[in-house]
Amino acid sequence: MMKNMWNPIWKTNSWWAFVYRLALAYFFFGLARGLFYLFNYRFFADMTAEQVGRAWMGGLRFDTAQHLHDVENMRALALSHQCQTRGIHEIA
């Protein structure tokens, strides 16, 4: 059977799908952070460009920690589901 050439790689490879979705999450979190800054710029009027950059990097670090936490929760959930379906009640 011939492989469909027109399928994007993130639809056929789970690792690329993960990277694609992670990039989308970072994009939308960054967009939300930028909109928050635009709508509340008067509260940040005394901040220098360096301070805004440091705050932005802190937000990226927070987003990364949140994504890693979600990945760990999904792994634990998948493992517990696998144990339940196989009849394993305790994980050694």
Image (cartoon, rainbow, N blue to C red):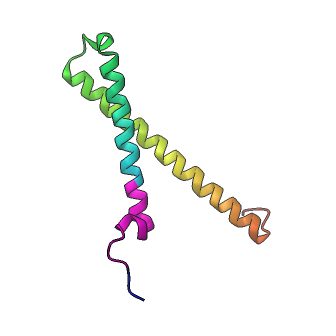
Q: Quadrant for residue 57, please give it.
A: top left
Relative to 63, say whether 75 is above or below: below
Position in image of residue 25 (x %, y %): 41, 45
Q: Please report the residue visible at 24 percent of the width from the left and 10 percent of the height from the top.
A: 46
**Main SS, magenta residues:** helix
User: In this picture, which residue range is highlighted in magenta?
Assistant: 4-20
> Which image quarter is the C terminus in?
bottom right
In-front residue for pair 43/12? 12
Q: Quadrant for residue 88, please give it.
A: bottom right
Q: Please report the residue visible at 75 percent of the width from the left and 68 percent of the height from the top.
A: 85
Does 19 lie within the magenta span?
Answer: yes
Q: Quadrant for residue 40, please give it.
A: top left
Relative to 41, say whether 13 is above or below: below
Q: Please report the residue visible at 48 percent of the width from the left and 41 percent of the height from the top.
A: 66
Does 9 lie within the magenta span?
Answer: yes
In-front residue for pair 2/52? 2
Q: Is residue 76 left or right of residue 59?
A: right
Q: Is residue 46 left or right of residue 65?
A: left
Q: Is residue 52 left or right of residue 89?
A: left
Position in image of residue 77 (x %, y %): 65, 55
Q: Please report the residue visible at 37 percent of the width from the left and 56 percent of the height from the top.
A: 20
In-front residue for pair 31/6? 6
Position in image of residue 51 (x %, y %): 25, 22
| Direction bottom: furthest residue | 1
Relative to 31, say whether 40 is above or below: above
> Which image quarter is the N terminus in?
bottom left
Q: Is residue 73 left or right of residue 67?
A: right
